Amino acid sequence: MQTIYHSLTSDSLISGNEFFKKNQYPEAVKEYSDAIKRNPKDAALYSNRAAAYSKLMAYSDALKDCDTCIATDPKFIKGYTRKAAVYNAMKDYRKAMTMWEKALEVDPNNQEVLSGYSQTMMKIQSKCFINLFFLSIFCDFVCGTDHSFKNRELDTCVSLFLHFH
């Protein structure tokens, strides 16, 4: 009986991978779900289904599968990298960085993790730079271009900027 379940799980995994390669993500989700029903202890299956959910922009489902993947096998790096990728897609870079850092704890030399960490850090820095640029323009508009305003005026300017940005 165990061999039959393993064979069926393997067939569903192969079918899911084929659908994924053809960009047929709903079908891939179905096949991965079938495989998970037969083998719920396989972290890779949750990781694969999370990838398919991500392609469908079903981010909450992808995050749930990533959490299950990590809980099932905390050493399986794909759970962390997929979760970081979902957070990046959602533009939640701080949570993505947390996942990259956890992945680095598991495997500090993994090139995918190092690259993802670096790319996410650049996105955060870029976002901060853009925010500072707009803050500067906003302060120029509100407080004047001579920048001779006092700390209280600057605090007001920053508060207004954050409120409207």
Image: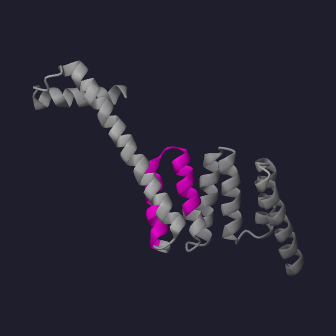
Examine the image and state in which quarter residue 71 appears: bottom right
In this orientation, which residue lies closer to the viewer: 62 or 51? Answer: 51
Looking at the image, is 81 positioned above or below residue 25?
A: below
Where is residue 138, by image quadrant?
top left
Q: Is residue 92 left or right of residue 52?
A: left
Which residue occupies 60% across, 65% down?
Answer: 78
56 is higher (above) or lower (below) than 137: below
Q: For this rendering, which residue is in front, 117 or 58?
A: 117
- Residue 34 screen position, x and y as percent: 81, 61
Q: Residue at x 20, y 27 (%)?
A: 156
The answer to whether residue 99 of the structure is visible from this angle is no
Residue 82: in magenta span: yes
Task: Work out which quarter of the rendered image holds the N terminus and state it.
Answer: bottom right
Taking the image as shown, residue 13 lies to the left or right of residue 113, namely right
Residue drawn at x 39%, y 43% as measured from the top left: 126
Query: What color scheme is it?
Result: one colour
* In-image side of 41 versus 106 (left or right): right
Bounds of the magenta segment: 81-105
Let me know if residue 36 is in the magenta part: no
Q: How many marks?
A: 0
Q: Position of residue 143 (x, y in %)?
A: 18, 21
The residue depicted at 87 percent of the width and 80 percent of the height is 3
Q: Residue 5 is drawn in which quadrant?
A: bottom right
Q: Quadrant of the C terminus?
A: top left
Return the residue nearer the eye: 98 or 115.
115
Please state the horizontal and vertical placement of residue 155, each as a whole percent of the image: 19, 31
Overall secondary structure of the magenta section = helix
* 69 lies above or below 27: below
Q: Position of residue 39 (x, y in %)?
A: 76, 70
